[in-house]
């Protein structure tokens, strides 16, 4: 809005920057003098753009409109940062103090050549420093056409002039060069060649028409190869104004190449924020020394092309809001050889301008926060996102879910604009639950693409879903284990997280065992006895905690623990009796079984396996063990009987030989009296007296007389018996003949004969003594004998009283000699 400040008579234009959203003021105060209207601009410290219109007729040293700055610093500075498009037309700005403010000025350099048809817009970026305060702002200059400004410009007007090259095969009268002087077409300028054209040197006269076209001679340039023609051209226009320039024509041999574009048509798209002077595209054509020009539209308001390099550049800002026609431009570019302008090709170039994306999408809500339980079903909707693009309501938006924590998890999913629960939502894995942070990235399809990030925070609360379990286990413990001994551990498993939040309790447990509440360790409290109880069953109950948002939510499970008591050998064998004494007769050269050692474990009658060994008293190694049987082996004596020991006190160790350990043992004491075996001997039998191991044994000895025949006597006795039977037969036959006569005399004779026989054998019976008979006969070695009788263990015959044996031996002889009738 333009207005007038009261009291000053100044016009105060308000210039607003749509980009920065700020405004600044310029005051143009009018002063009338000899030179007309002067404008003195005053400006506050600002960072807003300024717009100025300048004429293309301004020359070197021209000062642009000055602008003041308010600054209290003593040394402010004003800099020119850059110019777009790049040019050397502007000098560095100056700053001078004027009263209470500073005035900045920008002047044109000596190289300035403004041409509205070439570049009609410049941007100067200025920076003003006042102490520590720095302000930047652009200054936009629009170059306006000046119809009254006519000048000879370009290389044509330079001292060296313009040089062109043409082939010798150029068509007679063809256009060789176009003199483009700004404004000449409006003034009706007259152009002529003023330099002499010697007929002996020139093939003919070059000519130039009112359009500025230099035309070849009517005779052509055939045969003029490698020749150089210098033409001085004079341009005259109204009010006595004129200018001159030099144009040099070099004739070249005919080139063999042809001009062509690789693609006859091309479409490109650029952004509207492209700055003037920036490169749009570079076109290339094949040929020798190719030049480029835009042939349509003429003039071209937005684009220009490099004559030699074919670079298409922007000459004016592309603001589609102010100039919608800039959205689509069709250019026709011509490429031709510099020496053969007729050898050319054209390219159709379509330039489309796309609006610049300035604002990212806007979303509601700007932050997604949700809290759900871990058992939420798949597809549960957490929230729906609504986004729009401020640049265009029809813009297509793209949504993408990006996880932050935990990485790589897909607990959530985004379907279009809806955030849902995915199948992998779970709290029973470490680090997979409790808090999920993510972002929803919203992309638009503008150029450049812009993105909006919507933070997502989802709190997942744990739910106690599973009951704790434990596998049944069996523990083995020795019966001699001490109290408080560790038997093993109950290992509970809970699929809920955290997995170790389990407490253990023994349900209906025996008082012998206990279970640790936190670790599940099973300990022994009392003592064990394998013989009383071998198996225990313990029910362990498991209760979880701290696995649900509700602290009172618990689940329980149980399992059975079996405790097997291993037997430990804690009782030694006992022998019955532990002490005994006996007497045996030992035939020479024979083995005699002495006694079977009887042992057992009263507390454990099932144990029947024992091992036996003689650990003491077995001198001369005359005793051995066959299992539990004590055996005596009597070798042929090499020493007299009187010199051999006849009493042995044997110590027999009895050890349990079962699988249980340790193996315990006991020792039994057996005293053995040895008596040699003879035909007639007095046997001494010993009472087996069982005494406790801690008492002194009492020995009671009874002496008995018995007869023990020698082996040869048995043979003799057998023969004697046969003879006796024969004699009895003879006697019976005689008795049958006469019983009466024999009843008196023979009896006496027989008695006398028998008495004599007995007396004859008294010498052989010496050494036999008759001892008083024991009222309670004792037995040994498994055989009982009467001391008054003789029994042969070899033949099994009863021989009668020992005193009658000699008489019976002689009885058959006496009977046979009796005088029987």
Image (tube, grey):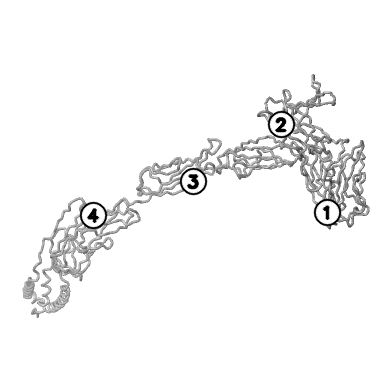
- Residue 525: x and y in percent read 38, 42
Gap between marks 2 and 4, in whole Å?
130 Å
In depth, the one of 686 and 818 nearer the eye is 686
Mark 1 near mark 2, Cβ–Cβ under 8 Å? no
Instruction: Give the side of residue 608 with respect to residue 701, left or right.
Output: right
* Residue highlighted by disc 3: 470
Viewer-side label of 1, 2: 2
> Label 2 neighbourhood size at 10 Å, few (<14), some (14-19), many (20+)?
many
The residue tagged 4 is 578
Inter-mark Cα distance, 3 to 1: 87 Å
Q: Which residue is mark 1?
A: 260
Dot in front, 4 or 1: 1
Query: Which residue matches tag 2?
Result: 78
Tell me how far mark 1 sits from mark 2, CA to CA: 51 Å
Q: Residue furthest bottom?
A: 821
Q: Which badge, 2 or 4, comes first in the chain's sequence? A: 2
**N-terminal-most mark, 1 or 2:** 2
Decide which of 21, 725 is in the foreground and name it. Answer: 21
């Amino acid at each position: 809005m333009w207005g007038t400040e009261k009291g000053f008579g100044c016009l105060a234009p308000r210039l607003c920057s749509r980009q920065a959203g700020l405004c600044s003021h310029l005051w143009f105060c009018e002063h009338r003098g000899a030179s007309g209207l002067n404008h003195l601009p005053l400006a506050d410290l600002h960072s807003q753009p300024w717009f100025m219109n300048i004429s293309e007729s301004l020359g070197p040293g021209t000062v642009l409109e000055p602008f003041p700055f308010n600054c209290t610093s003593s040394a402010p500075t004003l800099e020119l940062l850059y110019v777009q498009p790049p040019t050397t037309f502007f000098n560095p700005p100056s700053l001078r103090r004027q009263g209470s403010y500073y005035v900045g000025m920008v002047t044109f350099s000596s190289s300035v050549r403004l041409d509205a048809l070439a570049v009609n817009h410049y941007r100067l970026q200025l920076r003003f420093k006042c102490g520590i305060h720095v302000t930047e702002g652009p200054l936009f200059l629009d170059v306006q056409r000046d119809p009254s400004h006519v000048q000879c410009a370009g290389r044509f007007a330079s001292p060296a002039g313009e040089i062109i090259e043409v082939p010798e095969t150029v068509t007679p009268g063809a256009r060789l060069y176009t003199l483009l002087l700004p404004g000449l077409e409006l003034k009706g300028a007259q152009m002529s060649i003023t330099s002499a054209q010697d007929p002996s040197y020139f093939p003919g006269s070059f000519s130039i028409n009112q359009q500025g076209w230099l035309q070849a001679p009517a005779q052509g340039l055939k045969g003029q190869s490698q020749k150089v023609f210098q033409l001085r051209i004079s341009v005259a226009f109204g009010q006595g104004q004129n200018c001159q320039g030099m144009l040099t024509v070099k004739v070249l041999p005919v080139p063999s190449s042809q001009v062509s574009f690789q693609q006859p048509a091309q479409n490109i798209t650029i952004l509207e924020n492209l700055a003037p002077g920036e490169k749009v595209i570079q076109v290339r054509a094949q040929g020798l020394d190719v030049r480029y020009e835009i042939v349509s539209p003429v003039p071209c308001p937005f684009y220009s092309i490099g004559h030699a390099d074919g670079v298409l550049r922007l000459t004016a800002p592309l603001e589609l809001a102010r100039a919608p026609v800039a959205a689509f431009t069709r250019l026709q570019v011509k490429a031709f050889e510099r020496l053969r302008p007729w050898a050319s090709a054209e390219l159709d170039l379509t330039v489309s301008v796309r609006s610049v994306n300035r604002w990212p999408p806007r979303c509601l809500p700007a932050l997604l926060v949700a809290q759900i339980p871990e058992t939420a079903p798949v597809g549960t909707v957490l929230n729906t996102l609504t986004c729009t693009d401020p640049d265009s309501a029809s813009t297509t938006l793209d949504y993408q879910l990006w996880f932050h924590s935990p990485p790589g998890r897909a607990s959530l999913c985004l379907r279009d604009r809806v955030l849902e629960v995915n199948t992998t939502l779970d709290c029973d894995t470490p680090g997979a639950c409790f808090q999920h942070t993510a972002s929803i990235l919203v992309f638009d399809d503008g150029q450049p693409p812009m993105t909006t990030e919507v933070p997502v925070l989802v709190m997942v609360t744990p739910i106690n879903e599973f009951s704790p379990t434990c596998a049944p286990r069996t523990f083995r413990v020795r019966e001699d284990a001490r109290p408080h001994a560790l038997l093993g551990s109950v290992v509970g498993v809970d699929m809920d997280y955290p997995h170790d939040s389990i407490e253990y309790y023994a349900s209906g447990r025996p008082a012998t065992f206990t279970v640790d509440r936190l670790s599940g360790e099973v300990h022994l409290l009392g003592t064990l006895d394998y013989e009383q109880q071998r198996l225990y069953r313990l029910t362990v109950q498991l209760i979880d905690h701290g696995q649900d948002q509700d602290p009172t939510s618990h689940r329980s499970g149980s399992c059975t623990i079996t405790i097997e008591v291993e037997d430990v050998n804690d009782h030694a064998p006992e022998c019955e009796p532990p002490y005994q004494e006996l007497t045996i007769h030992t035939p020479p050269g024979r083995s005699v079984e002495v006694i079977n050692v009887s042992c057992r474990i009263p507390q454990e009658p099932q144990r029947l396996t024992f091992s036996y060994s003689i650990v003491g008293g077995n001198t001369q190694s005359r005793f051995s063990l066959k299992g539990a049987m004590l055996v005596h082996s009597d070798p042929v004596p090499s020493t007299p009987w009187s010199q051999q020991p006849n009493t042995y006190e044997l110590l027999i160790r009895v050890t349990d030989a079962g699988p249980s350990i340790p193996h315990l043992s006991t020792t039994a004491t057996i005293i053995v009296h040895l008596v040699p075996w003879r035909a007639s001997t007095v046997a001494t039998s010993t009472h087996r007296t069982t005494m406790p191991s801690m008492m002194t044994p009492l020995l009671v000895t009874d002496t008995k007389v018995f007869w023990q025949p020698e082996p040869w006597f048995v043979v003799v006795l057998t023969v004697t018996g046969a003879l006796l039977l024969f004699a009895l037969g003879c006697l019976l036959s005689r008795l049958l003949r006469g019983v009466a006569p024999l009843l008196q005399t023979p009896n006496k004779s027989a008695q006398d004969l028998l008495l004599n026989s007995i007396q004859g054998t008294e010498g052989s019976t010496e050494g036999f003594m008759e001892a008083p008979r024991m009222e309670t006969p004792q037995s040994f070695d498994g055989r009982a004998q009467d001391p008054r009788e003789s029994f042969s263990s070899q033949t099994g015959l009863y021989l009668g009283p020992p005193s009658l044996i000699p008489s019976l031996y002689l009885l058959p002889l006496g009977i046979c000699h009796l005088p029987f009738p």
